[in-house]
Amino acid sequence: MAVARVTVITASSTQGFQAAFQEGITRATDTLRNITGAEIVSQKAKIENGKISEYRVQMSITFILE
């Protein structure tokens, strides 16, 4: 029987929401083992001078505890 944990992280990118999501996954795999899934909880954008300057995603990461 496996036990999983869910943690919430936020990641950002100047390239778009997909790039921010990938950045979060890449960073999470540096410190978490046994990641089994991810879900985007929210998407936000930072606006400067009427234009999007940064894309941000908040995501839930699920991983199996050892």
Image: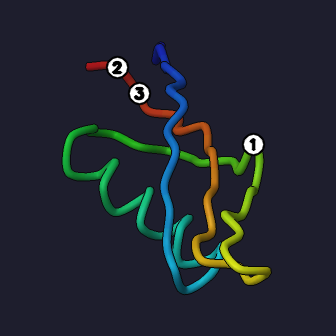
**x then y, percent, for residue 9:** 49, 38
- Which quadrant of the figure contains the C terminus? top left
**Within 10 angstroms of label 2, few (less than 14), some, or many (20 or more) residues?**
few
Q: Are marks 1 and 2 in contact (CB under 8 Å)?
A: no
**x then y, percent, for residue 53:** 60, 77
With 7 as the anchor, is 28 left or right in this view? left
Q: Residue at x 50, y 62 (%)?
A: 12
- Nearest the eye: 43 or 31: 43
Q: Say the numbered circle drawn on residue 41.
A: 1
**Within 10 angstroms of label 3, few (less than 14), some, or many (20 or more) residues?**
some
Q: Which quadrant would residue 45 be assigned to in this image?
A: bottom right
- Compared to residue 14, the image places residue 37 above or below, namely above
Q: Which residue is mark 2?
A: 65
With 60 as the anchor, is 10 left or right in this view? left
Q: Which comes before the other along the chain, label 3 or label 1?
A: 1
Q: Say the numbered circle drawn on residue 64.
A: 3
Please name the amino acid that badge 3 sits on: Ile
The answer for how far apart the CA atoms under marks 1 and 2 are is 22 Å
Q: Residue at x 63, y 81 (%)?
A: 16
Dot 3: what SS? strand
Dot 2: what SS? loop
- Compared to residue 6, the image places residue 38 above or below, namely below
